[in-house]
Image (cartoon, rainbow, N blue to C red):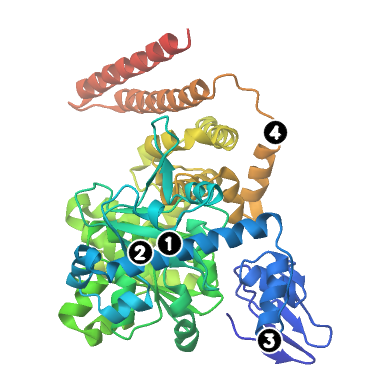
């Protein structure tokens, strides 16, 4: 949580609810209220706790009461009663799994987890358990009533059998069980790691009234105090990484419930610290997770840095190299721009100087300060052994000409062509807004970084990130990122326009083919211009290229004719 500074009777600081560089969040002790002049969020202590801790308003009242030692008793009704029932059932399951791993019958699970380096104390601290390879272990152990059967089915502990005997079976079998506990100590769900030959390495409980995967962090209940004390959170990839770090005395460590962190999780950590360090595995999956996490972290008020282990995962690295070496990697972590540049330079030999330069320019373009841009452009010249003045001139062209550094003959683009591409991408976004099932196709079909229209590129970039992080997300989540500005205005117009398209898939294909045909027409025009001005032997090559392009165009046109007839 950003600190507050006293100014007159009030206190002022950076708002914890939106990204800002100039403090606009004020607290009035006299009036017992807070207000942000930037995002216009305000209220009393209960509103503040409700937003900070992600609690419903009645729960925020209970939370504040608990802080001052006041007990609030109320009759549980409706949703609150359902949540309490789920917490009760999950805690019973946790205790049952945990007791089993410590029993003679759970020897297989205990041998596995201790073989991974987890100590008996950590097994107790994190309440790790074992679900044996049985179809009805949990059912026989803790489920007694019809209500419990329905509840266990709802949260994904059991499933109904396909037979007609109304029986159920356990979902978690032959798995190490990691309870997922929220900040208040409630058992919300489980993550199960197979120790057999199941191709699904990890499975989680179903989302429920108490479990939203994107809004929870594994280990935060144990890490919160340490995160506050050191003003830093270290984010690793998995359950065992968290446990291994805590076991080694590094307690400000948490993990998302999957490889990619979410905006909600980043904001949650921002309530407790000013710095987040993403510490990822040395493999390619870790690299991809790092990039996605950086994209999502750009809208937060916290400082973000990235550390990449030279080998193994955090638990393995600490075991092999020790705490000091691990913390050395943490302390030497770099800012997002330097991390991205290092990743681009790793591929320099494969993609060549021009493509490398374009990708590096894409990183520099996102920088807000000209002084920062200037320093990085100088560094790029050194990295690629290119004259600094040439780099600066090319970067200026990159900004002015829609990311292209091609010869002038290939840079010219008629206004009508540019307008057509812009309209097409915006039509595509509008279609996706009304028919989000098309997102999967768009993510595959389009290279978002190549979109010349900045508004379309920004919106489709965020949609792609959300889809890659959670393929079950709903399209309205896009408004979490664009709360103002031209993107917000464009999205509002699109969402508020009714759609009466009979066949959305056909409409998508039509947009895609029209853009491909348009691209081919542009290339044909280019080669036709080259033929007119050509006096060299390339004349016949240009004619051949035009013929190939015309055949491609004919195939696309024929496909469209056959599909829509």
The disc placed on residue 93 is: 1
- Left or right: residue 458 versus residue 49 is left
* Disc 3 target residue: 69
The disc placed on residue 97 is: 2
Do residues under tags 2 and 1 come within 8 Å of each other at their CB atoms?
Answer: yes
Of mark 4 and mark 3, the one earlier in the sequence is: 3
Q: Where residue 81 sits: x, y (%)?
A: 65, 59
How far apart are labels 4 and 3 at the CA level?
Answer: 52 Å
Q: Tell me which residue sits at (38%, 24%) in the image.
A: 525
Q: Quadrant of residue 137?
A: bottom left
How far apart are labels 4 and 1 at the CA level?
Answer: 48 Å
Q: Quadrant of residue 101?
A: bottom left
Q: Where residue 229 sits: x, y (%)?
A: 48, 88
Q: Where residue 1 sits: x, y (%)?
A: 57, 80
How far apart are labels 2 and 4 at the CA level?
Answer: 52 Å
Foreground tag (1 vs 3): 1
Of mark 2 and mark 4, the one earlier in the sequence is: 2
Foreground tag (2 vs 4): 2
Residue 145 vs 297, above or below: the answer is above
Where disc 4 sits, the SS reads loop
How far apart are labels 2 and 1 at the CA level?
Answer: 6 Å
């Amino acid at each position: 949580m950003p600190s507050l500074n006293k100014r007159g009777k009030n206190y002022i600081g950076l708002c914890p609810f939106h990204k800002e560089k100039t403090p606009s969040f004020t607290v009035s002790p006299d009036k017992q209220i807070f207000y942000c002049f930037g995002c216009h969020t305000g209220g009393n202590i209960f509103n503040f706790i409700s937003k900070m801790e992600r609690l419903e308003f009645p729960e925020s009242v209970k939370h504040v009461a608990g802080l001052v030692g006041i007990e609030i008793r109320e009759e549980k009704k409706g949703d609150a009663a359902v949540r309490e029932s789920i917490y009760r059932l999950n805690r019973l399951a946790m205790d049952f799994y945990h007791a089993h791993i410590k029993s003679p019958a759970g020897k297989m699970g205990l041998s596995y987890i201790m073989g991974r380096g987890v100590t008996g104390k950590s097994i107790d601290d994190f309440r790790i358990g074992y679900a044996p390879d049985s179809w009805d272990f949990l059912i026989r152990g803790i489920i007694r009533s019809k209500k419990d059967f329905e509840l266990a089915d709802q949260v994904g502990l059991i499933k109904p059998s396909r037979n007609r005997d109304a029986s159920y079976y356990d979902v978690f079998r032959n798995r190490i069980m990691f309870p997922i506990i929220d900040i208040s100590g409630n058992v919300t769900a489980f993550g199960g790691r197979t120790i057999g030959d199941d191709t699904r390495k990890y499975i989680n409980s179903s989302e429920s009234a108490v479990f939203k995967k994107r809004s929870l962090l594994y280990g935060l209940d144990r890490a919160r105090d340490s995160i506050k004390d050191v003003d830093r959170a270290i984010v690793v990839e998995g359950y065992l990484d968290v446990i291994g770090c805590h076991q080694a005395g590094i307690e400000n460590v948490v993990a998302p419930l999957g490889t990619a962190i979410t905006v909600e999780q980043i904001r949650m950590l921002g309530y407790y610290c000013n710095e987040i360090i993403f510490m990822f595995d040395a493999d390619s999956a870790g690299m991809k997770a790092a990039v996605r996490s950086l994209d999502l972290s750009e809208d937060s008020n916290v400082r973000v840095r990235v550390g990449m282990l030279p080998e193994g995962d955090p638990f393995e690295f600490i075991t092999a190299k020790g705490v000091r070496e691990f913390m050395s990697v943490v302390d030497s972590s770099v800012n997002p721009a330097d991390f991205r540049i290092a990743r681009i330079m790793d591929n320099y030999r494969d993609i060549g100087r021009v493509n490398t330069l374009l990708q590096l320019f894409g990183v520099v373009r996102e920088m807000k300060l000209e002084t920062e841009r200037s320093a990085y452009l100088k560094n790029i010249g050194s990295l690629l052994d290119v004259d600094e003045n040439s780099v600066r001139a090319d970067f200026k062209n990159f900004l002015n000409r829609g990311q292209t550094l091609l010869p002038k003959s290939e840079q010219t683009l008629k206004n009508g062509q540019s307008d057509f591409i812009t309209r097409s991408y915006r039509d595509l976004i509008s279609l996706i807004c009304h028919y989000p099932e098309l997102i999967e196709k768009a993510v595959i079909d389009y290279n978002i970084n190549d979109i010349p229209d900045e508004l379309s590129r920004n919106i489709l970039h965020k949609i792609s990130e959300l889809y890659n992080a959670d393929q079950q997300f709903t399209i309205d989540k896009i408004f979490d990122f664009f709360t103002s500005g031209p993107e917000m205005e464009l999205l509002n117009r699109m969402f508020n326009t009714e759609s009466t398209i009979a066949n959305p898939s056909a409409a998508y294909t039509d947009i895609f083919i029209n853009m491909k045909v348009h691209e081919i027409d542009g290339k044909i025009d280019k080669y036709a211009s080259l033929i007119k001005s050509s006096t060299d032997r390339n004349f016949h090559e240009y004619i051949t290229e035009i013929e190939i392009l015309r055949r491609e165009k004919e195939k696309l046109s024929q496909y469209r004719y056959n599909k829509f007839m």
